[in-house]
Amino acid sequence: MTTLRVVVDELIGDGSSGAQRYAEELTRQIIATAPAGTEVEGVVSNLPQETIDELTARLPGLARLIKLPLARRELTVAWQSGLAIPGARGMIHAPSLLAPLRKHDRADGDQTTVTIHDVLPWTHPDSLPSTTVMWHKAMAKRARKFADAVVVPTHAVADRLIEFVDLGDRIRVIGGAPATTLRLPPDADERAERLGLPHHYAFTLGSIQPRKGIAPLIRAVARPEALGIPLLIAGPDRYGDGSATGVAAAAGLPEDRVRVLGQLDDADLAVALDRATVFVFPSVAEGFGLPIVEAFKFGTPVIHSDDPALVEVAGGASLIVERPEQGTSAADDEGYSERLAAAIGRVLTDEALRARLAVLSADRARAFSWRDSAERVWQLHADL
């Protein structure tokens, strides 16, 4: 029996982060697509038995869950230092950089693959905690020395990553997909009423941290080209010392023109995406851009920046807006707001364009499948 061990520590927490969603969805499908004669085990840090039981229930079909002797914090430090931890050997796949990256011999059945989701620690370190930046850079160096393969979500990330870490020919592109739980619920009308969704609205997701581009989007809907359309934001109102509602007020917008909905559960998010007139994703730096793929799932017209990862993932099914010039913050670029407003205006006034984007969106959504991603992971390990 061949065993693939998946590091599942990313699943621990409230389940709200993209990394947690990625790890859970991919692990479930790795289990579901296990070839004959193989099994899947989970590897996790030292957790309370109650948490272990809950984690096991979330991953049906898992052969067993290996609990390592160290808690998460200590395990992170140990693996960064290259220490050997009992139970963390064999054929290992990590949906992040948290992995036992140390010298090993594939001839003995040991192999380690890790995942790097983006290059933000190098290109936008100010958007992450300094400790996170240092840890990712340190683990990327270990991956350069000891990983048998490194998975990235897009060719765009692969192209940028080689500027910072020389991984040779070990990079493999395996993308993600929308969460399987993101689907329209039976009570969609009631949820839409509770959320106060207007008949027509622009929808986005994120905070006003600079790289997300939400602040220039808010200023864009204040421009006449946006035709007074309301903007609804799924995400936190505040970031640092600022807030989305504060940006809206400074732009002279009335309270009903920009509404922050906070973090939405999957059912509410599905309803908001499905009923949006247009989904706008103005982020200027992404590794994959899952929100636009989620919008595609509901056939919603999509506008986004010309960030290479977003352009790659959209595959021609969207309207693309040029980002601010390099070295110019999206938050301070009025030209970016103007271009976003013009794109929104085009979608709102051109019925044929809006209909074509909706068709392209729904068609593009079929290109993303967690099952396909999991099968590629199995093929990767077979190739190694």
Image (cartoon, rainbow, N blue to C red):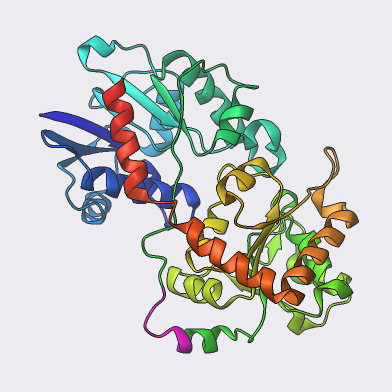
Q: How many marks?
A: 0
Query: Does the stretch in magenta take in 185?
Result: yes
* Residue 277 point in image, percent of width and height: 64, 75
The residue shown at (26%, 18%) is 110
The residue shown at (32%, 48%) is 371
Q: Write down the quadrant of residue 182 in the picture.
A: bottom left
The residue shown at (32%, 42%) is 374
* Residue 361 point in image, percent of width and height: 55, 62
Name the residue furthest front: 352
| Residue 346 shown left or right of residue 45 in the figure | right
Q: Nearer the viewer, residue 285 or 347?
A: 347
* Residue 304 point in image, percent of width and height: 68, 56
| Residue 104 shown left or right of residue 119 in the figure | left
Query: Does the stretch in magenta take in 246?
Result: no
Is 148 rendered above or below residue 94? above
Residue 136, visible in the rendered structure: yes
Is 226 rendered above or below residue 40? below
Q: Which residues are magenta?
A: 184-190
Q: Quadrant of the C terminus?
A: top left
Is 333 rendered above or below residue 195? above
Q: Nearer the viewer, residue 85 or 383?
A: 383
* Residue 323 point in image, percent of width and height: 78, 48
The residue shown at (61%, 67%) is 356
Is 201 rendered above or below residue 208? below
| Residue 308 shown left or right of residue 107 in the figure | right
Q: Quadrant of the N terminus?
A: top left
Residue 232, visible in the rendered structure: no
Q: Write down the quadrant of residue 46 in the picture.
A: top left
